[in-house]
Image (cartoon, rainbow, N blue to C red):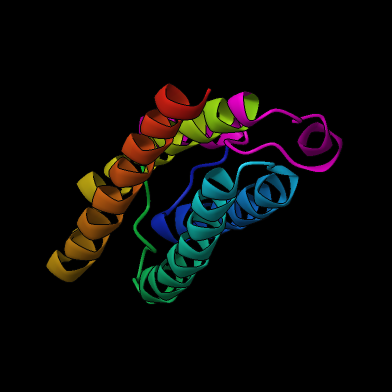
Amino acid sequence: MAESLNLADVAKMAMENEERGRIFYSRMAKKSDDPEIEQMFNKLAEEEIEHKQLFSKLTVRYEALPDKGALDKNGSEYIKTILGSHVFPSGADLEKVNSASDALGIGIEAEKESILLYQELMNRSQEEDTKKLLSDLLAEEKMHLIELRQYMNEFV
């Protein structure tokens, strides 16, 4: 039987996802020949750091809950499915990304997956201040998606 998750587990996984995003966007900025795309990737990398810090706070908050915000089996499986795809490439896979087009496409898919995950977290959260924080984070992720799409349409 698959192990059930709780909100503290999910927040930790989200922190790892944000760190992979930071690494991805930083590497893509260094690989870019276009100053505008480099600047965009650097900006996204900085924002991933901020997001990781938010999830660190949520982890502490959720760990303080008596049941740590236990998720039902379906919720656990859904979140594992989202995170199981390792939204951002890492290691050798990261080094294979050589074009701005590929990097933008990966970024677009990663932001979509992040939106799904954070929406699920917000839906399952009980505390209004946590919902507000996740709502703000969702708005940022949606802006990332829009920005990446615009760059894809403009520069590639």
Q: Quadrant of residue 146?
A: top left
Asked if residue 13 is positioned above or below residue 31 in the image, the reply reads below
Q: Which region of the structure is painted magenta?
A: 72-101
Q: How many marks?
A: 0
Going 62% across and 39% down the picture, which residue do you hit?
A: 88
The residue lying toward the viewer, choosing from 37 and 68, is 37
Q: Is residue 128 left or right of residue 39?
A: left
Q: Quadrant of residue 106?
A: top right
Asked if residue 123 is positioned above or below residue 56 in the image, the reply reads above
Going 40% across and 56% down the picture, which residue do you hit?
A: 7
Q: Does residue 37 show up?
A: yes
Q: Is residue 94 magenta?
A: yes
The residue lying toward the viewer, choosing from 110 and 68, is 110
Asked if residue 52 is positioned above or below residue 99 in the image, the reply reads below
Quadrant location of the N terminus?
Answer: top right
Residue 117 in percent (x, y) is at 39, 40
Residue 98 in percent (x, y) is at 76, 30
Going 81% across and 29% down the picture, which residue do you hit?
A: 96
Going 61% across and 49% down the picture, which residue do you hit?
A: 25
Q: Which residue lies most toward the left here?
A: 128
- Provide the major secondary structure of the magenta segment: helix
Q: Is residue 42 left or right of residue 72?
A: right
